[in-house]
Structure formats: structure tokens, C-alpha cells
């Protein structure tokens, strides 16, 4: 049965001074006694509790938030998602409530029917959250700051990669991401990175050769695979992670041969990066990102019908909070990885030629604690109680006025620094270590 991060017991349990399991739509105690179960109202948040009088449509609905071309030629406006809050006000003739509403057309033959409460709670999967927003022509702050602090940002990119091995996670490698499902592509990159970080002068040449060979083999294998097997979003993410790690090592180690090899892989990495984002957008649209347990499935490829059937059968038994957490981990990892890959690309171009071709930015979650939440329960609690700071990359400057530094996580601070500079971070109250 569905459970959400409620802090108060239902009215009957509170009155009887009995423990409430806080299940929805009714707790176990009220169900066993066949009495009405009502919960006290909670403040608006990123989550939605369905009204007790609301019933799902008899027609199956999915997470295809995009418009139905036959019914409406106009997609949902990007302004329909508020960067700092996913709540909108809906007024009826009798009451005024604050809920997250997502337009949902009827299911298509390729979509996956999902429980309505999962669809309305998935605030991070609406169509406009996947848009790549270009930097305004007159906004040169990103370019100027990259030019002034390019080497600093290169070191930051290297830290994002190395912390995967050193700390077990980083702002682009979630601690939960590869705990169960660890694709061979990511495994190869992880072992190469671990070996690289333990190099000594006597072994450095051999280790760099291993790194280069791993990158070449990865590109060759993925190119040969082509369309033989449909790749799901998780596998897209794993191969981008793998080539990103190997490319960062090659570009910025200082070895001329490895730099040349890594530079030759940048166009492929860019193509994979965009394909990963598109795959995630499609998976969000069809409902697959929530319905498929991508983190725990033993193998990838949404064309594996046996796995899909098992996933469909297990969906009603899955904890919906965990399902949303897993979907968010994949979605946020995709967005952050896309941003980092493009930052690596433009940082290298700035060092090499002094000019860059900026590809724009996507949305990201910036509230401290959301990314590092160790469980679905804690993650859901933070999302229910706080505004998670889900912002567009180009509009992140508003965090300076609406957040204290300690309320923004490490990745959010990195985005702010690359966009608006170290001096602006210091005025905000952040101590900048210029040697880091």
C-alpha cells in the first residue's frame, strides 16, 4: 500500500492515542475497523496527497505529459513548471486547494499505465524539465568566468570524477546508482579510474595506456553494437559516465598522446550525452522511468520482454516512494551528467582555443540533502517539507537571493560558481579556496 512521508497520524488514531502506520489512502488500523480514515492537512510541497473523494479515471493514464498531437497542436509551455516550486493553485466552486497538476492524456499503446498518485507526485518528469535552455545572447558571464578560472574548473571536474572512487559517490555519481546494477561499461571505467588514482611514476605510462585502451574499446564496442539491442536510459547513463571518466583523465592528465586520443572521443561523447538526455525524456514521457526499476534490474534493454513483464507484475507491490526515489536518482543523474560533460567540453575548448560553443543548460535540484539522502523515506521527507530548489541552469542566479549558502548543495554551488564567478560566491557568503 502507498506510504508517504507524513508527520502526523490520522484523526481516529490520534483520538484513540494509538500508533498509526500512516498508509494511504487509509491506515491499517482504520481499514481493519472499517472506519473513516482522515489525515490532517499539510502545507503545500512538492508532493501531492490525493483527495479522499478523488477517484482514478476508468481509462488508464500514463506519464505521457506531452500533448496529444491529434487533440492539441501546442505542447505544454515551459513556464508551466515553476523553478522553485512545483505547486500550482487550483480553484473550484467550493474549495481552493494547492496541488501539483500534470496534464495527462489517455494512454497510448506504447505507454505504461501507472497509479495516479505516482504520476501526480513525479514533479521532476514534466516535459519542460527536459528542455535544454540556451544562454541568452547578452549573457556572457559564463564565458567570462570560464576564461578567468578555467584551470580551477578543470580541477573541479577532475574531483567530481575521482570522488567516485575516493568517497564512493560524488555530485554526479549517486551512492545508490550502481549498488545493484553495475553495467560492464561503468565497471571498466571504475577500475581504470581506481588504478589511475594509485599510479606512481614507475607505472604511470602503463596505466595511461590502459585508460586509453579502455576508452577506445568502449567506443568501438558501442559503435559496433549499434541498434542490435535497444538501450534503456540506465545503460545510456552508464556508457556516458564511463567515457566521461576516461575522457577527463585523458584530456587533463598532461600526457600528449592521451590528450589527442581523448579529444578524438569528444564528438562521440557529445552524441552519447544528447542521446542519453533524449532517452530519459522519452522514458519520462512513456512512464518507463518510474515503472521500470532501473536501479535494481539485473540487465538492461527495455526490449527484454521477460524483464518488462516481471517489472509490470511487481509494480503494485513496489513501495511507491522508493519507485519515485529511484526514478529521481536516474533523472537527476542524467541531468547533472549532461551538464558536467558539456562543462568539460567547453573548459577544454577554452584552454585550447580561448573560445567555446555553449550548448545551454538543463534543470537541476539544488537543495542541500536531497542528493545525499540515504533512503527513499528520508528523500521523500525532504521533498515533502522543503522547496527542493529545482531550477533551470540559466536561472540559477536567483538562488543568491532566495537561499543561504548552506541550503545549496555542492553541485548547485559549482553551477553558480561557473556561471557567476568566485567573487559573486564570496559576496553571497561562500569562502572560496582559490587553490582547490
Image (cartoon, grey):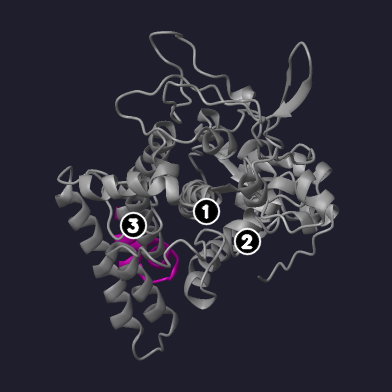
Disc 2 element? loop
Q: Which residue is mark 3?
A: 297
**Image disc number at residue 373:** 2
- Give yes or no for contact between labels 1 and 3 (Cβ–Cβ under 8 Å): no
Q: Position of residue 158 (x, y in %)?
A: 51, 66
The disc, 1 or 2, on the residue closer to the chain's N-terminal end is 1
- Inter-mark Cα distance, 1 to 2: 12 Å
The picture quadrant where one finds residue 112 is top left
Q: Position of residue 162 (x, y in %)?
A: 49, 71
Mark 2 surroundings: few (<14), some (14-19) or many (≥20) residues within 10 A: some
Locate residue 431 relative to residue 76 in the image: left or right. right
In percent of the image, x 40 and y 85: which residue is there?
199
Residue stretch in magenta: 247-264
Q: Which residue is mark 1?
A: 322
Mark 1 surroundings: few (<14), some (14-19) or many (≥20) residues within 10 A: some
- Give yes or no for contact between labels 1 and 2 (Cβ–Cβ under 8 Å): no
In percent of the image, x 36 and y 65: which residue is there?
246
- Inter-mark Cα distance, 1 to 3: 14 Å
Q: Can I make out residue 34 in this image? A: yes
**Image disc number at residue 69:** none
Q: Which one is closest to the eye, mark 1 or mark 2?
A: 1
Amino acid at each position: 500500500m502507498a506510504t508517504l512521508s507524513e508527520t502526523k497520524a490520522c484523526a481516529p488514531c490520534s483520538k484513540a492515542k494509538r500508533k498509526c502506520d500512516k498508509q494511504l489512502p487509509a491506515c491499517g488500523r482504520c481499514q481493519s475497523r472499517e472506519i473513516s480514515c482522515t489525515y490532517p492537512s499539510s502545507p503545500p510541497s512538492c508532493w501531492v496527497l490525493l483527495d479522499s473523494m478523488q477517484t482514478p479515471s476508468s481509462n488508464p493514464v500514463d506519464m505521457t505529459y506531452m500533448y496529444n498531437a491529434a487533440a492539441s497542436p501546442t505542447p505544454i509551455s515551459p513556464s508551466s513548471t515553476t523553478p522553485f516550486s512545483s505547486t500550482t493553485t487550483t480553484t473550484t466552486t467550493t474549495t481552493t486547494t494547492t496541488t501539483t497538476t500534470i496534464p495527462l492524456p489517455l494512454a497510448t499503446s506504447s505507454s505504461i499505465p501507472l497509479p495516479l498518485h505516482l504520476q501526480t507526485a513525479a514533479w521532476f518528469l514534466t516535459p519542460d524539465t527536459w528542455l535544454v535552455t540556451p544562454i541568452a545572447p547578452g549573457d556572457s558571464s559564463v564565458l567570462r568566468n570560464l576564461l578567468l578560472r578555467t584551470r580551477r574548473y578543470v580541477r573541479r571536474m577532475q574531483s567530481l570524477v575521482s570522488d567516485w572512487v575516493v568517497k564512493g559517490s560524488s555530485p554526479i555519481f549517486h551512492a545508490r546508482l550502481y549498488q545493484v546494477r553495475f553495467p560492464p561499461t561503468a565497471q571498466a571505467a571504475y577500475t581504470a579510474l581506481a588504478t589511475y588514482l594509485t599510479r606512481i611514476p614507475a607505472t604511470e605510462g602503463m596505466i595511461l595506456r590502459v585508460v586509453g585502451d579502455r576508452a577506445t574499446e568502449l567506443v568501438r564496442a558501442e559503435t559496433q553494437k549499434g541498434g542490435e539491442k535497444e538501450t534503456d536510459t540506465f545503460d545510456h547513463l552508464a556508457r556516458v559516465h564511463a567515457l566521461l571518466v576516461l575522457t577527463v583523465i585523458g584530456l587533463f592528465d598532461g600526457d600528449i598522446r592521451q590528450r589527442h586520443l581523448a579529444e578524438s572521443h569528444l564528438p562521440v561523447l557529445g552524441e552519447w550525452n544528447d542521446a542519453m538526455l533524449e532517452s530519459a525524456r522519452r522514458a519520462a514521457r512513456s512512464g518507463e522511468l518510474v515503472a521500470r526499476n532501473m536501479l535494481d534490474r539485473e540487465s538492461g534493454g527495455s526490449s527484454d520482454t521477460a524483464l518488462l513483464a516481471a517489472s509490470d507484475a511487481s509494480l503494485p507491490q513496489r513501495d511507491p516512494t522508493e519507485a519515485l526515489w529511484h526514478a529521481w536518482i536516474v533523472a537527476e543523474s542524467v541531468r547533472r551528467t549532461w551538464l558536467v560533460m558539456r562543462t568539460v567540453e567547453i573548459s577544454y575548448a577554452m584552454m585550447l582555443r580561448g573560445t567555446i560553443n555553449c550548448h545551454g543548460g538543463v534543470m537541476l535540484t539544488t537543495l542541500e540533502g536531497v542528493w545525499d539522502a540515504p533512503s527513499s523515506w528520508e528523500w521523500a521527507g525532504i521533498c515533502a517539507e522543503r522547496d527542493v530548489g529545482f531550477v533551470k541552469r540559466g536561472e540559477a542566479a536567483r538562488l543568491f537571493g532566495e537561499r543561504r549558502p548552506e541550503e545549496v548543495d555542492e553541485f548547485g554551488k559549482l553551477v553558480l560558481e561557473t556561471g557567476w564567478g568566485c567573487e559573486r560566491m564570496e559576496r553571497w557568503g561562500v569562502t572560496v579556496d582559490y587553490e582547490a
